[in-house]
Image (cartoon, rainbow, N blue to C red):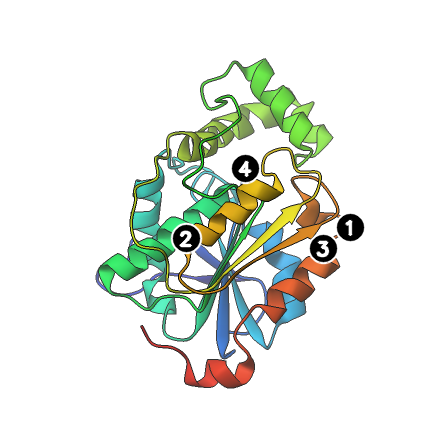
């Protein structure tokens, strides 16, 4: 595993970016953002399978894995500001962003921040399992819910191993980070701005109770370019289940071709 430490005078010097495969010279870079409670390891298999044609950079947020002693972010705007500093040195080539659930929201706001700062914008944003950012939530708030309710919700989502949810020691370490992640999403308030210039690819599970097809289609309002919606069998975590192979195929098809990547689209 290779940690990509931020460089330059403004870099915070923490391990935000992780490479699981040697592909730093690939013509296109794919940044992958985790869902609530997730870590960089979620995309290890993707990195190994897509190398050396695609340089997969997994984003490791504070409060998990090797950063478990660091306080997790509870506000999206603060998280995005720090993340931009960390990834700026890696925007030297054509790149795309992928995010599932909370990660989709982070990716969207990150793209807006890049444009605001005049930094290189992505070739494509790929969002998964998340309603369009301007749509209100249909779910109750969980970042300040009792522990029992929060654990029950995690069981319903079926994205956390049962042995973790049944272990008091594991829960004592997990729940503060998960609460912070829920706060990132649940305290977010969309602000109107012009749509993104890059194409958006929207992925979802047909049985996902958190994002129905209409809510996914709402992403079309957030891009001046193409916005396609693809649905797969499965629930909220369809991409880590039976549909994983199809998801990878759709994802790579949506990346810039190697020929286009060599010239790039400098913003």
Query: Callout 3: helix, strand or loop?
Result: helix
Q: Which mark is residue 116?
A: none
Distance from the alpha carbon under mark 4 to that under mark 2: 26 Å
Q: Which mark is residue 37?
A: 4
Q: Which residue is mark 1?
A: 242
Callout 4 touching callout 3 (CB < 8 Å): no
Q: In the shown orientation, is residue 52 left or right of residue 241?
A: left
The residue mark sitting in front, 1 or 4, is 1
The residue mark sitting in front, 2 or 3, is 2
Callout 1 touching callout 3 (CB < 8 Å): yes
How crowded pointer 1 is (Cα within 10 Å; few <14, some 14-19, many 20+) is rated as few
Q: Mark 1 or mark 4, which has the lower sequence index?
A: 4
Task: Identify the residue at image location x=43%, y=74%.
Answer: 94
Please identify the quadrant where the C terminus is shown: bottom left
Q: Position of residue 103 (x, y in %)?
A: 49, 46
Q: In the shown orientation, is residue 180 left or right of residue 81?
A: right
Q: Which residue is mark 2?
A: 222
Q: Which mark is residue 244?
A: 3
Distance from the alpha carbon under mark 1 to that under mark 4: 21 Å
Q: In the depicted view, which residue is nearer to us: 124 or 120?
A: 124
Residue 47 seen anywhere in this rendered image of the structure: yes
Query: Callout 1: helix, strand or loop?
Result: loop
Distance from the alpha carbon under mark 2 to that under mark 1: 29 Å
Q: Is residue 219 above or below residue 200?
A: above
């Amino acid at each position: 595993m290779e940690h990509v430490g931020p460089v330059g005078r403004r870099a915070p010097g923490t391990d935000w970016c992780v490479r699981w495969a040697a592909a730093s010279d690939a013509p296109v870079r794919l940044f992958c953002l985790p869902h609530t409670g997730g870590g960089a390891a979620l995309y290890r298999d993707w990195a190994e399978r897509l190398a050396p044609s695609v340089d997969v950079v997994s984003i490791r947020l504070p409060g998990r894995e090797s950063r478990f002693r660091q306080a997790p972010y509870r506000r999206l705007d603060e998280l995005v500001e720090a993340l931009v500093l960390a990834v700026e040195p890696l925007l030297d080539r054509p790149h795309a962003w992928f995010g599932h659930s909370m990660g989709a929201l982070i990716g969207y706001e990150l793209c807006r921040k890049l444009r605001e700062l005049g930094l290189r914008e992505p070739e494509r944003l790929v969002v998964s399992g998340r309603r369009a950012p301007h749509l209100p939530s249909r779910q109750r708030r969980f970042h300040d819910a009792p522990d029992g309710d929060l654990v029950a919700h995690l069981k319903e989502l079926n994205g956390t191993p049962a042995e973790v949810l049944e272990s008091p020691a594991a829960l004592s370490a997990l729940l503060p980070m998960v609460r912070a992640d829920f706060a990132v999403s649940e305290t977010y308030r969309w602000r109107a701005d012009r749509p993104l210039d890059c194409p958006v690819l929207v992925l979802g599970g047909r049985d996902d109770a958190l994002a129905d097809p209409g809510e996914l289609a709402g992403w079309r309002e957030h891009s001046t370019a193409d916005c396609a919606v693809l649905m797969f069998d499965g629930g909220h975590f369809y991409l880590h289940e039976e549909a994983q192979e199809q998801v990878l195929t759709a994802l790579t098809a949506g990346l810039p071709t190697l020929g286009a990547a060599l010239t790039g689209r400098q913003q």
